[in-house]
Amino acid sequence: MRDAELLFAKNDLSEVLRAHEIKALDAIESFHADRLLNTSVEDLFQYFVAEYKVNPIRIFEDQISVDQAETKIDVSQDQLRLIHDRSEPFYVNGTRVTFFVPFEGDKTLLYCRASTFSFNPPRAFVSEKEIQFVFDRFDHNADGVKAAFESAIGSFKQHLEWTNRDVNQFNAQLPQKIRQKIEQRREKLLGARGMVASLGFPLKKRENAPTTYTAPVARKKIQSPPPASTAPYVPEPVLDMETYEQILKIMTSMVLVMERSPNAFRDMKEEDLRQHFLVQLNGQFEGQATGETFNYQGKTDILIRANGKNIFIAECKFWKGQKALIETINQLLGYVSWRDTKAAVLIFNRKKKFSEVVGAIPEIVKSHPNIKRELPPLSETSRRYLFHHNDDNNRELLLTVMAFDIPGNE
């Protein structure tokens, strides 16, 4: 039988993880350009994180099994035995006890030296799903075998803890690096295409340019990139985050005026409140170089339009419970037609306890089937979410839901 393998010692774990990170970033850099631009950033982010996250090792101690068999033990190097020729094996009868420890995770980690290590790492036999600790003995001392195994598994668990600590730290930092790389490449591609477009000549198609994309084969994973077109990407007008934040700040300031002057707004309906927002917003933004102005469509909409398309929508609603909030979100999703559209829902409360309204909103919003994820909140009463369009997962809506307590009677 071959000798047991030396674990947690062969490769430097930091170098292995660094090479893995470079591989992930290179995969983003080589990703089909038009497909990258036509795919939701959030979906791309989730795909690459899942693809390149390192799976830490986990053992299942409650599933450990043991086997016993007769064996021949080579004692040629046992100095306590009288053996004339130690250059040849000298076998005696003995017992082999094997402990089988099931595990899951990236097997290669078992051969990597973590940032914390010892000079006496454990030895074992490793298969695809099990770690085998083998003990050959001349006696039938069960306590002795058990003590030997407990010592070996204890050393193994200590080294595994050091390894997984480094892996978990790597996995915690990887998402930020992946998102940053995706955004950097998008900016680079969009900047290059904007420069070419400004020249005023049609873009020449490369003769050998690929029209489809094949996902790279990843070890131990069967996963495809998010579905998206590889057709040439056409940049679309978007509302930048700075302007978006300015709009929300103006609306928040307007509501604070209402809270501080309740008598002036006590009997106002939704339409009246909306008009006050329009006056404030047009006073700040109308006549700017972009030509974007605030208008209203239907009964309660506040819009920014560019090239005939909505790029910002806000809805002002009095709190009427879960059904009404879901209907408002559905209404917004029906309006949007361009990627990266930004929107807001302003919830005015007059009848319920405000704390109950604030507490109910997040769970209601997260129950919507189109939500992708909850983003970090702006405040206790203002939450932000990422949604996808009804018929296209790559068309996204950044939605801020803001709740305000307005004194008076509806």
Image: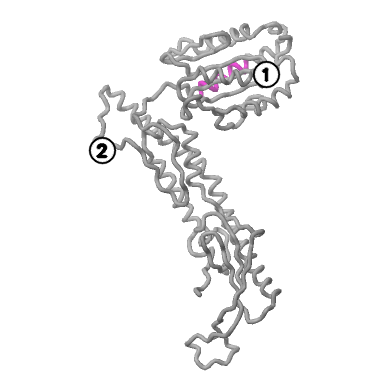
Q: How is the image coloured?
A: one colour
Furthest toward the right, the residue is 353
Q: Is residue 79 magenta?
A: no
Q: Position of residue 9 (x, y in %)?
A: 52, 64
Q: Position of residue 105 (x, y in %)?
A: 54, 54
- The image shows residue 139, relative to residue 306, as above or below, that is below
- The image shows residue 284, relative to residue 197, as above or below, that is above
Who's the residue at 53% across and 25% down the image? 398
Who's the residue at 51% across and 47% down the image? 53
389 or 92: nearer the viewer = 92
Q: Which residue is mark 2?
A: 208
Estimate how packed mark 1 is, as few (under 14), some (14 to 19) or many (20 or more) residues with alpha carbons within 10 Å.
many
**Would residue 57 be found to the left or right of residue 209 on screen?**
right
The secondary element bearing badge 1 is classed as: strand
Q: Position of residue 44 (x, y in %)?
A: 46, 37
Q: Is residue 250 magenta?
A: yes
Q: Which residue is mark 1?
A: 404
What amino acid is found at the position of numbered circle 1 in the picture?
Phe
Who's the residue at 51% across and 9% down the image? 295
Would you identify the image quadrant in which residue 409 lies? Answer: top right
How far apart in space, not on screen, are marks 1 and 2 (Cα)?
Answer: 57 Å
The residues colored magenta run: 241-253
40 or 121: nearer the viewer = 40
